[in-house]
């Protein structure tokens, strides 16, 4: 036993931590849902933690045990930390596109909760900033909060949903939030910049070719990216990370994935296997009827949020200006079909599968495939490909 004798073990619901108190007054804490066997447990089940002798923690009802010494050494009981995985972490995660949810659920919830504006106590405010809106959407989808107009409020008894949100969407939400908050910084042209330039403690991230896809991130960010299978133990981007990073497409990297074989195959599939419901919606989006032009030309009276004061919604004056406005709006509608119902790894999602998807709006990958599909299938409606 490489630690003091424990005197108590408890679960702190306020911050989601398992707390071990020792006889000398010291304390050790670890995020509960980062531990193998606890990611999907209820708050009450996690709270049933008890000491098992002088070296272990026990959750009897869940049939879960952990050694305190291993937890203090950073080993959370997950497969990725076994010797077999430690030998070639990048190769193994590169082969499996999605790591087990037990590896990333706790770290992702903790990262989102800690880095969105607000807190678990007061709630979170997305301020209508894209990365924050998507991060808040993720917390709600993970059963940790309830949605409001300006951001989610924490649930008193959070519980994971029976069907989890998509791993790739959650990974994208983490990348977007990290970039928004400066927890990850993408370096242009693979520049090998001094560590101090981005702040002490930042870690170097890179591709197998060190001159490609260089970045720096905080240890906190690096840790959650590893749990998601986006980084291996040597801080190299894994094969699974590449299409996730396409969905952020940092301007510093100047990524052009449109000629990548994976994008081309996905485009072929999107055109060949487009569901009839999607085709019907595209037809509706594409056709600008006289009735639609008349409605926009006439304008309408809207009311403000409390319904007390009418506001005039201004419309363009000429028919061509009206058409331009409608085309702009319809392109956003077209993009939403891809945000909600299409993913590069799976193609078109069924309605049930789409319920698991986060709406990653302004997704460069979704917009690129929308433009390519429109150019190929609907050349007679060129505005759809703009």
Image (cartoon, grey):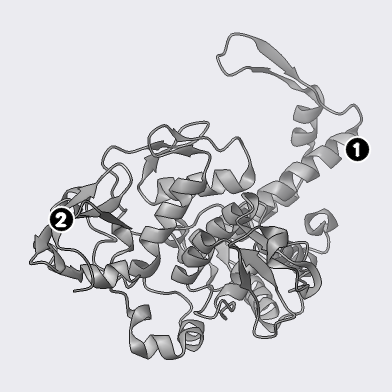
- Label 2 element class: loop
* Labels 1 and 2: the sequence-earlier one: 2
Q: CA distance from mark 1 to mark 2?
A: 78 Å
Q: Is residue 307 shown above or below 325?
A: above
Residue 314 quadrant: top right
Quarter the N terminus occupies: bottom left
Mark whose residue sits in front, 1 or 2: 2
Element carrying mark 1: helix
Residue 342 image-quadrant placement? bottom right
> At 92% across and 30% down in the image, what residue appears?
318
Taking the view exactly as shown, the residue that stands out farthest to the top is 308
Name the residue: 60% across, 35% down.
127
Residue 333 point in image, percent of width and height: 67, 48
Q: In this rendering, would 321 be left or right of 93? A: right
Residue 264 in sight: yes
Give the residue drawn at x 30%, y 41%. Answer: 14
* Residue at which label 1 appears: 320
> Which mark identifies residue 277?
none
How would you rate the neighbour count of disc 1 (Cα within 10 Å): few for under 14, some for 14-19, many for 20 or more? few
The answer to whether residue 284 shows anywhere in this view is no
> Please, is residue 271 above or below residue 370 in the view?
below
Q: Nearer the viewer, residue 340 or 241?
A: 241
User: Camera-side residue: 148 or 202?
Assistant: 202
Residue picked out by circle 2: 23
Quadrant containing the C terminus is: bottom right
Label 2, residues with CA under 10 Å away: few <14, some 14-19, many ≥20: few
Q: Is residue 384 left or right of residue 172?
A: right
Q: Horizontal placement of 363 versus 319: left or right?
A: left
- Residue 176 position, x and y percent, is 60, 55
- Tell me what residue is drawn at x 53 percent, y 72 percent: 230
């Amino acid at each position: 036993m490489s630690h003091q004798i424990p005197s108590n073990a408890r679960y702190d619901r306020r911050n989601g931590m398992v707390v071990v108190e020792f006889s000398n007054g010291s304390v050790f804490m670890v995020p509960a849902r980062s531990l193998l066997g606890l990611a999907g447990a209820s708050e009450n089940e996690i709270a049933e933690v008890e000491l098992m002798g002088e070296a272990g923690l026990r959750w009897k009802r869940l049939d879960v045990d952990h050694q305190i010494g291993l937890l203090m050494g950073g080993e959370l009981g997950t497969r990725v930390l076994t010797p077999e995985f430690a030998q070639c972490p990048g190769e193994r995660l590169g082969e499996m596109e999605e790591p087990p949810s037990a590896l990333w659920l706790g770290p992702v919830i903790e990262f989102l909760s800690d880095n969105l504006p607000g807190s678990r106590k007061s709630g979170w405010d997305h301020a209508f900033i894209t990365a924050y809106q998507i991060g808040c959407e993720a917390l709600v989808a993970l059963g940790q909060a309830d949605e409001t107009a300006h951001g989610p409020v924490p649930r008193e008894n959070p519980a994971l949903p029976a069907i989890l949100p998509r791993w790739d969407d959650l990974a994208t939400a983490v990348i977007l939030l990290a970039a928004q908050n400066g927890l990850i910084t993408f370096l242009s042209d693979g520049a090998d910049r001094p560590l101090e330039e981005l702040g002490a403690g930042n870690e170097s991230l890179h591709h197998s070719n060190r001159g490609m896809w260089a970045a720096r991130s905080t240890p906190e960010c690096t840790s959650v990216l590893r749990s998601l299978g986006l980084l291996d133990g040597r801080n190299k981007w894994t094969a699974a990370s590449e299409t996730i990073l396409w969905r952020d497409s940092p301007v510093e990297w100047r990524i052009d994935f449109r000629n990548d074989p994976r994008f081309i195959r996905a485009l072929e599939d999107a055109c060949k296997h487009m569901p009839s419901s999607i085709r019907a919606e595209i037809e509706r989006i594409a056709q600008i009827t006289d009735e639609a032009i008349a409605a926009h030309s006439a304008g309408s009276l809207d009311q403000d949020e409390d319904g007390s004061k009418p506001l005039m919604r201004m419309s363009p004056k000429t028919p061509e200006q009206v058409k331009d406005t409608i085309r702009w709006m319809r392109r956003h509608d077209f993009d939403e079909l891809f945000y909600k119902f299409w993913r590069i790894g799976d193609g078109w999602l069924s309605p049930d599968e789409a319920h698991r998807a986060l709406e990653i709006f302004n997704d460069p990958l979704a917009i690129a495939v929308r433009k390519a599909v429109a150019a190929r299938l609907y050349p007679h409606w060129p505005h759809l490909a703009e």
